[in-house]
Image: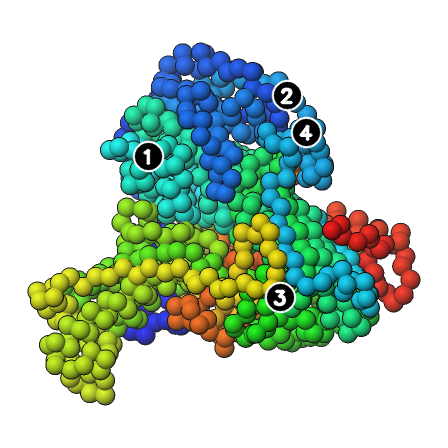
Amino acid sequence: MTTHMTLRVNGSDHDIAVEPDTLLLDALRYECGLTSAKLGCGTGDCGACTVTVDGEAVNSCLMYVLECEGHSVETVEGVTASGIGAVVAEEFVKADAVQCGFCSPGIIMSTCALLARTEPGAATDEDIKEALAGNLCRCTGYLPILDAVRRASGAPR
Amino acid sequence: MSAEESGPYLNVGNRLIRRDAAERLTGHTTYAEDIRLPGVLYGVLVPSLVAAGRLRGINVDRAVALDGVVKVLTAKDVTDRCYGNYVKDQPIFARDRVRFVGEPVAMVAATSLAIARRAAGLVEVDIEATTPVVDPREALTSAEVLVHDRDTNVIEDVHISRGDVDAVFDTAHAVVHTEIESHRAHQAYLEPRAVTAAPAPGGFSLIMSTQQPFGVRAQLAELFDLPTGTIEVRVPAIGGGFGGKLHLLFAPQAAAMTLATGRPVQIVCSRAEDMTTGNPRENSIVRMSSAVDESGRILARRCDVVLDAGAYAMDTPVLTSMAAFYATGPYRIDALDIRGRAVYTNTCPTGSFRGPSGPQMVYAAEAQIEDIAQQLGLDPAEVRRRNFIGEGDRGPTGELITLRGTTDECMRVVESRLQRWRQADVAPGDHRRRGYGLACAWWSTLGTPSAATVELHEDGTATLSSGGTEIGTGAISTALPSMVAEELGLRPDRVILKSGGTRDAPYDSGSRGSRTMFATGNAAVLAARAVAEQIRNEASRLLEVDPADLVLREGRVEVKGAPETGMTIAEVSASAHLHSGPVVATGRYRAELAPVEGSELQGARFLRLGEPTFHCHGVEIALDEETGRVDVLNFVAVHDVGRVVNPVGARGQVEGGVVQGIGYALTENLKTNDQGVIVNGNFHDYRLPTIADVPPNIETVFIETNHSHTGPFGAKGLGEPPVILPAAAIGSALRDVLGVQPYQLPLDADRVVLTIAERDSHPVPGPPGSTARPPEPEVEK
């Protein structure tokens, strides 16, 4: 039951062959060669697979890739290349908000989705915590992440 | 490259920016699963579904018949040698018997993961289930249910004795008893365990998420009877480990499949597999008694620790010794009778988790201090102060302590914060009760062997080759090159790191035991010093001055006191390459094994702290007495780890460790039912702290006046200590509110409510909360 589809990722179209049950995560990793999104749990509990679809953060391990036809998917490789995503990544570096890095792409994507729906400087700590509560990090203890997101939120866009 | 990255010449002790941070944050770092070799087969393990039983037969016909299946392996297809870090008790696939739910009995390799999974489900396993033993108390005494073909389930029995304990107990002012039970907790690194094996001339290579590639190589060489050099272990970035990636994981199974098929084979655990077949922190029972004088001075201690090893030994033998060792806490006790035992049960094997045996031993030792204080009507901080161990004292095994003891200094900082928090106003309408607690500990820095090579190139840049494993702390990626740069008078960005496995560097004993900065760092610094000497010798020839009069600084070799006389390091290196040879040296390090005196030691595998680190944590909690919910409002972590090489990285270790410690204390609990089944082996039911759960402020303080005599730039190890204290500090804070503290971990809402109910149903005479439970019988001897 292999079908062909066009998946738009980071502004580029990928013509890929997929099964009806191919997950967005697997399509990104193994069909598009973008391995930033990680399989941490496969049940939507850890957020390591977070990407955005039309700007909204989703767990790509819970979404079929066929649902994404005609929509725009972004991964951390794309969003950190320029603009606010690059600012976010830089603030994470400055705050030492990365250790093993396995959760980082997902956390940056959740952050970018938050910043896309809030005005500069408007995100409160509660907003940040709500936006990132689905992203587990086992290394940092979260405080530098909180700090980095606060700074990125305040940065001009 | 940012300005900060090129940095000042003198960088140790300054804020270092992680060299590998940007790459990790932008998704360009490669982890084990990200690498799919051409022609790779996907390996899926067939687990035992029962905790104990006789394996009567395995029928693989239906699996083999499935299109896309290349091979199915069972015990009869592989060597009957077993493996294990200390006790070789684990088969590649269960042979004749199964011993825990999740134990591999077979493995399928197929051309796609989906096919491999389907085929694994078609393997028919015929097991005659037998009664499992899942409770360590039962396993300790049972002669009927034996997990292995031995006459007892006890696999490790350690004694540390010192002084005349019986005489002291007989004449003591008071005897205080404390007994605690602790639970299992999973490392819960975000990257599930992953390994890829591939054929290589004469052997095989691995791409593996492991904390100790050289240990993996040595054990696999023995298991498969191959020369060590025919096995290569490559370690890409690791998505966290915390001790959970120290053992062989599923490398033996992947390697066996590669040897059988001649093709690359990848095994990536699902989260459920990872959490049900890993090596979580062991559950344990700690019984402790102290004989004390009127002032609270501890004159003698008895302790009996039982660790649940699960079905295979893994790291438990050494953890048993560590548990016994840490029974004193950071206190000088001259008479000791400590017994540590580990027992097999038909449960998932347990093992190393950051600060192994630490959290429960600190909890027990600190609860005991609080019990002593309560029983004698003393201030617990004062009791601690009267007992702290320090320079010139001997530790439990008779190791001479050669550094100033600074636990008191750490505790004074914590006490000042607790006092400030007590005075702060509570928001109107907040009905929760506040509690304030603290805990003290000491810990070791593992001094196991490392070598590292430094080569200075013709252009004055250098390469550091280290077999150390960058587990995410930045110690390898950032601190080590910075230390080498400092020794060579180079900017940090002039030192290029080569690491990540066994191929490009000499031996290193892995990322564990808080050792990387210290021991791997020492090897790198020793190599750098030898290179610096070669440069001084060459410059001495060129400048016609005594090498002892030359210094390397800011990229130059200069005459001391006459900095205008000198050459660039690049010029000297180029000259050396032409005239005396390449500028290269290997440093090798193993911490000296100091003598231990005055204790009788039986079966002990962990004898020395090396240079101890000292610690105190303090916490403010809010307790909702209706629900039992505990929230951490404020936290302070004070550590003496000698000189801090990278303050920002060190703070990250402390904050991350504290939050893991809070998780262990309050919400994390890997539960096994009476059939040996782990019932919450997933991230939904196993509750890790999220960003919404962490305290708004974790203050990190370093006492930096007590430099190590032997560590690089005076550094000691930091990785583990932050995780071992939070549970004990929170327990102490609960006692502050309730007058009693739970003696069973975790301190979750259920436990807290039970503790309150128990307190209220057993009113005790004396001052409020004078003892937390009825008197207990003395520890068995």
Gap in angstroms between the C-alphas marked 3 and 1: 45 Å
The answer to which of B387 and B181 lies nearer the viewer is B387
Assess disc 1: are there few (<14), some (14-19) or many (≥20) residues with their C-alpha within 10 Å of its C-alpha. Answer: some
Using the image, tell me which numbered label, if any, was put on residue B129.
Answer: 2
In the shown orientation, is residue B167 left or right of residue B76? right
Q: Of circles 3 and 1, which is in front?
A: 1
Residue at the spot of label 4? B145
Residue at the spot of label 1? B226
Using the image, tell me which numbered label, if any, was put on residue B330.
Answer: 3
Q: Amino acid at mark 1?
A: Leu
Residue that lies at the very extreme toward the bottom in this rendered image: B561
Q: Amino acid at mark 3?
A: Pro
The subunit letter for the residue under badge 3 reads B
**Are both tags, 4 and 2, on one chain?**
yes
The quarter of the picture where residue B674 lies is: top right
Gap in angstroms between the C-alphas marked 2 and 1: 36 Å
The answer to which of B411 and B259 lies nearer the viewer is B259
Q: Of circles 4 and 3, which is in front?
A: 4
The subunit letter for the residue under badge 2 reads B
**Are both tags, 3 and 1, on one chain?**
yes
Q: Earlier in the sequence, mark 2 or mark 1?
A: 2
